[in-house]
Amino acid sequence: MSVHPQVEALLERVARSPLPPYHTVSPFVARRIYRDTRAALAPKAPEVPEVRLLAFENYAMRVYRPVVGEILPALVYFHGGGWTIGDLDTHDVLCRELALGARCAVFSVDYRLAPEHPFPAAVEDCLAATRYVAENAARLNVRGIAVAGDSAGGNLAAVVSLLARDAGVPQLAFQLLIYPATDQRCATPSHERNAQGYLLTRDAIRYFRRHYLPGERDWLDWRASPLLAKSHAGLPPAFVITAGYDPLRDEGAAYADKLRAAGVKVAYREYADMVHGFVLFGGVLESANAAVADCAAALRAAFERIPA
């Protein structure tokens, strides 16, 4: 299958951009490029009745509530960006959409970024944020917790699910993994097949990995490569999304297979004519809005299964 015509138009638009590739500039500049270009491709931000910030020593969370005063299920969301770029603002629209579509309180986590804070700082912050929501559920007016993320955030959601299972707390109801990075060896065929020309490039992946994992020995740590965990049994049900023209396509599919083989209930969907990052591009890609609706539906179904 060829790339979707709307993706082809987007790729042509990117090719005409005067902005430099991420891997050629400092993380400071890359963050600004990412923030501004994501805003230009996102749909209009929907109104959410309550949005507020929670701040802690090492991380912050922006909380979105689609209704005020009700006890709601909670979604702890980890943004993408190669553990190096991305923030609450780059994923603001998506979190608003998920809050409204899944009728849940979304806790979007602003975790520490590399290279200033390399692995495992992001893991520590995301686990701490998830535990905070669980331990303060009554005060936060929530019940039941799912985790989610895209790309690097999908990696962190998978890792937090493994850590929570091993510790026995918190109990997670679901994991939503949107084109997750699951194997830092980056050796699958899709890394070769989609290495150039589809937004996320081999050079960008190596740039992000170098900042997040400056020691190659950490590539094999399952907290960086959740596909390499010794066991995937006992994890919460999952919805895994991949894109056909994404270097991460194969490792996302492999993670879904690994979960399924371990007895975990898994739904998997590949958007065969899409590229990495497409879920954020609802302003120019119709498939992005369909994917967000799929995610919201999967979350709603998972939340409905939480015992009263």
Image (spheres, rainbow, N blue to C red):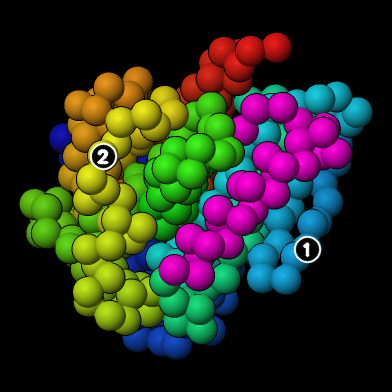
Residue furthest to the front in view is 167
- Spatial CA span between label 1 and label 2: 34 Å
- Residue at 33% x, 68% y: name it: 15
Where does the magenta region start and end? 120-145
In the picture, measured across the screen, residue 117 lies left or right of residue 197, that is right
Examine the residues drawn in magenta and state their main secondary structure. Answer: helix
Residue type at tag 2: Ser
Depth check: 177 or 276 in front? 177
SS for dot 2: loop
Classify residue 4 by image quadrant: top left
- Residue at 63% x, 12% y: name it: 307
From the top left corner, tell me how far across and down residue 221 is, in percent.
28, 62
Depth check: 165 or 5 in front? 165
In the image, is residue 241 part of the stretch drawn in magenta? no
Depth check: 2 or 114 in front? 114
Quadrant containing the C terminus in the rendered view: top right
* Circle number at residue 55: 1
Decide: marks 1, 2 in contact (CB < 8 A)?
no
- Give the mark nearer the N terminus: 1 vs 2: 1
Quadrant containing the N terminus in the rendered view: top left
All told, the count of numbered labels is 2
* Circle number at residue 68: none
The residue that disc 2 covers is 231
From the top left corner, tell me how far across and down residue 288 is, in percent.
46, 38
SS for dot 1: strand
In the picture, measured across the screen, residue 95 lies left or right of residue 120, that is right
Task: Give neighbour class at mark 2: few <14, some 14-19, many 20+ (Cα, 10 Å).
Answer: few
- Residue at 38% x, 74% y: name it: 212
